[in-house]
Image (spheres, rainbow, N blue to C red):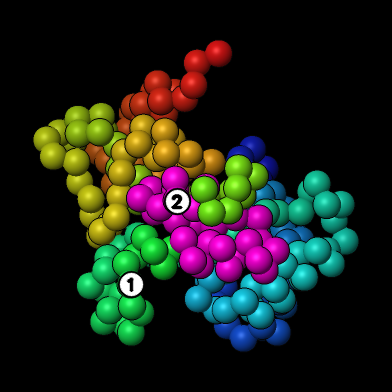
Amino acid sequence: MRQLGPEIFLDLKFHDIPNTVAGAVSSAVGLPGVRLLDVHTLGGLEMMRAAAKARDESALPKAQRPKLLGITILTSMDNSSLRRVGISGTASGRAVKLAQLARQAGLDGVVASPHEVRAIRRACGKDFLIVVPGVRPEAGKRSGISGKRKKDDQARFATPTDAIRAGADYLVIGRPITAAPDPEAAARAILEEIASALPQD
């Protein structure tokens, strides 16, 4: 993949005891082309600190180390889903608290739904990275797909335009491209939507 040109988001969502996660991060940091990698914030403060320490102890120069992100609340989960696994409060409220915990642990940013971007930005600052999955293009933008925007299994989603205007640093867009009849055309349409949402110089 790296030889093809793009940098890589190694989205393995490490979630284990601190020592195990530290070992996983140590291995992942040295892989060629990895720019972003992630752990689950629900692993707790000590687990995230161990992950950040493993990143910091990499032999790579600081500028070349991947950015370490914390998964907050999966975009497939809503308030009801959280209650069923014993987590109280709203998905948005929990995501912001977990983002603050990730920042305290020394992570570079988080992965969060587009619904939480503004609140996380206020709570964690302008330099804290926010990567946004659950992105679905405007209806009719995807080649061969028309009508109502398809959400797949996403409970908390938004358009690329909404996510960018909320303050997202990166967008994660999968099935709107990979499941489209013409993935290349779908990707081009999404890129056009993204370009129209970006501030114009």
* Three-letter amino acid code of the residue under disc 1: Gly
Image quadrant in which the C terminus is located: top right
Rendering coords of residue 124 (x, y %): 58, 53
94 or 161, nearer to the observer: 94
Task: Identify which residue is drawn at 53% across, 54% down.
Answer: 123
Q: How many marks?
A: 2
Rendering coords of residue 13 (x, y %): 53, 68
Residue 71 visible: no
Residue 46's place in the image compared with 55, above or below, is: below
Rendering coords of residue 164 (x, y %): 43, 35
Task: Identify which residue is drawn at 64% across, 38% down.
Answer: 5
For residue 50, side relative to residue 99 (left or right): right
Residue 158's place in the image compared with 98, above or below, is: above
Task: Identify which residue is drawn at 26% across, 73% down.
Answer: 81
Q: Is residue 71 magenta?
A: no
Residue 152 sits in quarter: bottom left
Q: How many neighbours does mark 2 have within 10 angstroms: few (below 14), some (14-19), or many (20 or more)? A: some
Q: Residue furthest left?
A: 147
Circle 1 residue = 89
Please, what is the dominant secondary structure of the magenta stretch? helix
For residue 169, side relative to residue 175 (left or right): right
Residue 87 sits in quarter: bottom left
* Three-letter amino acid code of the residue under disc 2: Ala
Which mark is drawn over residue 119?
A: 2
Stretch in magenta: 96-121
Secondary structure beneath dot 1 equals loop
